Image (cartoon, coloured by chain):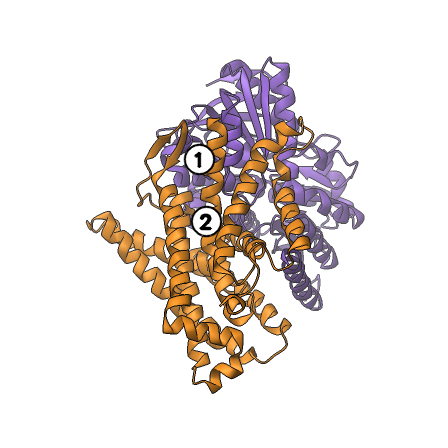
Chain colours: A orange, B purple
Amino acid sequence: MDTLLQQIINGYVQGSVYAMVALGYTMVYGILGLINFAHGEIVMVGAMVALSVVQLLINSGLPPQLVLLFSLIISVSVCMSLGYSIERIAYRPLRKAPRLAPLITAIGVSIVLQNLAMIIWGREYLAFPPILPNNSHRFFGAIITEVQILIVLVALIMMGGLLLLVHQTRLGCAMRAVAENPTAAILMGVNTNKVIAITFMLGSGLAAVAGLMISARYGIVHYYMGSILGLKAFTAAVLGGIGNMRGAMMGGLLLGLIESLGAGYIGDLSGGFLGSHYQDVFAFFVLISVLIFRPSGLFGGRIAERA
Amino acid sequence: MSIQKTSLYSAIASLILLASCGKSEAPAHKENNELIVKIGVVAPLTGPQAHIGKDSENGARMAIEDANSKGIIINNKKVHFELISEDDQADPKTATIVAQKLADANVNGVIGHLNSGTSIPASRIYSNHGIPQISPSATAVNYTAQGLKTTFRVIANDGQQGRALGEFVASTLQAKKIAVIDDRSAYGQGLADEFERSAKSYGGQIVAREYTNDKAVDFTAVLTSIKSKNPDLIFFGGMDPQGVPMAKQLKSLGLDVKFVMGDGGFTPKLIELAGDAAEGVYASQPSLPLEQMPGGSNFSQRYMAKYQQPIQQYAPYCYDAVNVMIAAMQKAASVEPEKYLSELGKITHAGISGNISFKENGDIKGGSVTLYQVRQGKWQPLQTINEDGIASQD
């Protein structure tokens, strides 16, 4: 029983990691209809910048909370300006181009970012100092660490914050307008360029937070970490219905749970016929089944269609 | 969508490769009667194993620079060795593209690849072009079991390494209930299979066999499943990028077990990254300890001075592999693959890692496996197990 609970906790935490990244994908898609494949790489840059700041400040005698705060602020601002620049340089000139062009550009941007990071931070794995509290707690026989609790909370706060922003503020109203019909939004006096730029900056800022949390959880940072994470998070976003905030969150959690329970029980349930290497097969099987019956994902629909 | 992304990546990669293939070849002879010998070195220089790949390239580069400064003369001509470094991204598909590229560039020999999963598919291409291939690090049994005349390696294979690990775990560590995880790569899977067979034959019981992949960082699910089976030892067949988070997550899940890896885990990086979680981890290396290698300490000092970082893993074997190849060329008085290949099979070379000579199939003769444990933040050699299974205690 405690094994099952432990697997559910594992899956929930892993799912929250996916959800944090998936929110960034889904927000940009929801407003622009663009799949920003570079998002995983922005998470990586956020982690790298945070690591550099932590390394710089850790021996300065500042309390760890303050070091954490500084690294968070700096990595969020670096990622926001990075997000803005990417949108300005790579995507805005292509806004009226066929859909395939920005998609390929996004892949190009992600390769560029990955290689830039390799040049700046090197190809070594880097150790992320244990700056977040990481004590274990027993919980009905299962073990959960403080970083894991924090990841779940941060993911929830991120989603709640975004939902509030999109549905309760003037900026959110403008975002929904742009999502629904960019031309009409311009006619109504919405500054579309500004709204889209802000969307990218917000998404990138969230990516930085996700990057910091993920590095703190696994303790290692590498220039390649963004690509596989991005792929999984993208899958989660599609599973939940890309473009939809609640969908990204639920898709992430669901993917995490499927992976964890799949890897944990598939071997025993099939009598050793299938092993834990089928966990991805299992996850993608669920994705395909969902898409067959609900082509727009579990929660369906972009921000605009639901507004 | 994910498939589209990867296929786009590979499409772009192959376009770039095609473009670079179009360049005209450098002439084999310079006008001033200097013989240019091209030696290809292949390792993952990007991706999760880039640090280990770069380490190998560094080792080969040192050997080539040494050879050039010695001014080697073959067949009355001064020889200039040229290193052609290629990146196979630890990916079997890319490895074959890179191998074809090197074959087209008419290299005189290849040092590589780093991984078994890349060395095996690439070896077919080298064999078809008659190019000798010496891997400094591929340990999978299959690499030299394909019946190819051109495949060699300078370290012991996983048959031997897996046997030694199984013997060590069951006899020395007295482990009764053993869980095995592998990363589904040719190396990880092969080593884990050999280990499992050997551990069983020494009386160990395998209570769980789990799997992951060589890009994963979260192992809580398989570890939780293993925990419910109460093993006293976990063996992981894989590399250090997975070994580090696995060692950490073991601790945070409260699993009190011995953790053992093969040569994929035997890196200074593992200790640096895993910190406290690395303490007590076991790993093997299919060779003598660096300190006991004839030229080990001298080489590691020179490496440190040149690259400002310690040896990660395979640099000494890469250095030896290049030198063995050059020695065979000198003996055959020719740099042409078809001429020096037969000498390579017969050679006896005093390398920095020990005496190197090859068996019929290209495996090293008399290889040994050393077992290590992390104690007070350092890899300490525990015992060396020879080819015939006799352990010599340190």
Disc 2 secondary structure class: helix
In this rendering, the label closer to the viewer, 2 or 1: 2
Disc 1 secondary structure class: helix
B82 with respect to A195 (left or right): right
Query: How far is mark 2 from mark 1, CA to CA?
Result: 16 Å
Does residue B358 sit above or below B135 in this rendering?
above
Residue B38: which quarter of the image?
bottom right
Residue B88: x percent and y percent?
A: 63, 52
Residue A77: which quarter of the image?
bottom left
Q: Is residue B327 visible?
A: no
Does residue B53 sit above or below A25 in this rendering?
above
Q: Residues within 10 Å of mark 1 (few under 14, many from 20)?
A: many
Which residue appears at 56% of the width and 33% of the height?
A: A264
Q: Is residue B269 visible?
A: yes
Q: Nearer the viewer, residue B118 or A266?
A: A266
Q: Residues within 10 Å of mark 2 (few under 14, many from 20)?
A: many
Does residue A80 sit above or below B58 in this rendering?
below
Q: Nearer the viewer, residue B392 or B355?
A: B392
Report which residue position mark 2 lands on. Answer: A17
Q: Nearer the viewer, residue A185 or B212?
A: A185
| Mark seen at residue A236 | none
Residue B234: x percent and y percent?
A: 52, 26
B14 with respect to B267 (left or right): right
Residue B246: x percent and y percent?
A: 48, 35
| Mark seen at residue B249 | 1
Under mark 1, the amino acid is Gln
Under mark 2, the amino acid is Val
B76 with respect to A118 (left or right): right
Which residue appears at 69% of the width and 54% of the height?
A: A292
Chain for numbered disc 1: B
For the residues beneath circles 2 and 1, the answer to whether they share a chain is no
